[in-house]
Image (cartoon, helix red, strand yellow):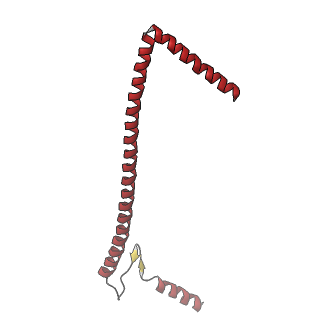
Amino acid sequence: MNTRRDVRGGRSALFDDIEDGGIRATSSYSSHEIDEQENDRAMDGLQDRVLMLKRLTGDIHEEVEGHNRMLDRMGNDMDSSRGILSGTMDKFKTVFETKSSRRMFTLVASFVVGFLVIYYLTR
């Protein structure tokens, strides 16, 4: 029984320095030194996080800039294709307005349809 009390006494001696919520200042360290060390560790951790977030936001910025350039190119391509299509539609309107060009159009359309039929039959 005496050894059990020694074990309990040893355990309580081990945990004497621990209080609720943290470590009690021992004789070799003052409370101020421990607080400074904890603050330094916290600042180092925050600095690492800030650097990581800075790199991440830089990467996001580069990605957004790349997408904006791609969207600008697509917008320019769409504008140029819109111009080409409007020119083509104007030409079709001109073709349909005259009688002789209607005959030419029906001739060309029949050749295209005939070509497509022959192409699909030989495939």
- Which of the two residues, 43 or 58, is positioned nearer the viewer here? 58
- Which of the two residues, 65 or 23, is positioned nearer the viewer here? 65
Residue 26: x, y in percent? 37, 85
Q: Residue furthest top?
A: 99
Q: Residue drawn 51% across and 84% down?
A: 11
Residue 34: x, y in percent? 34, 80
Relative to 60, say whether 12 is above or below.
below
Relative to 48, say whether 57 is above or below.
above
- Which of the two residues, 35 or 102, is positioned nearer the viewer here? 102
User: Which image quadrant for residue 31?
Assistant: bottom left
Residue 44: x, y in percent? 35, 72
User: Which image quadrant for residue 106?
Assistant: top right
Lateral position of residue 110 relative to residue 34, left or right: right
Q: Quadrant of the N terminus?
A: bottom right
Q: Residue drawn 33% across and 75% down?
A: 40
Q: Residue drawn 51% across and 10% down?
A: 103
- Which of the two residues, 78 or 94, is positioned nearer the viewer here? 94
The total of numbered circles placed on residues is 0
Q: Residue furthest left?
A: 32
Q: Quadrant of the C terminus?
A: top right
Relative to 21, say whether 75 is above or below.
above
User: Which image quadrant for residue 3?
Assistant: bottom right
Residue 87: x, y in percent? 39, 24
Q: Residue furthest bottom?
A: 2
Lateral position of residue 9 relative to residue 121, left or right: left
Q: Residue drawn 37% across and 54% down?
A: 62
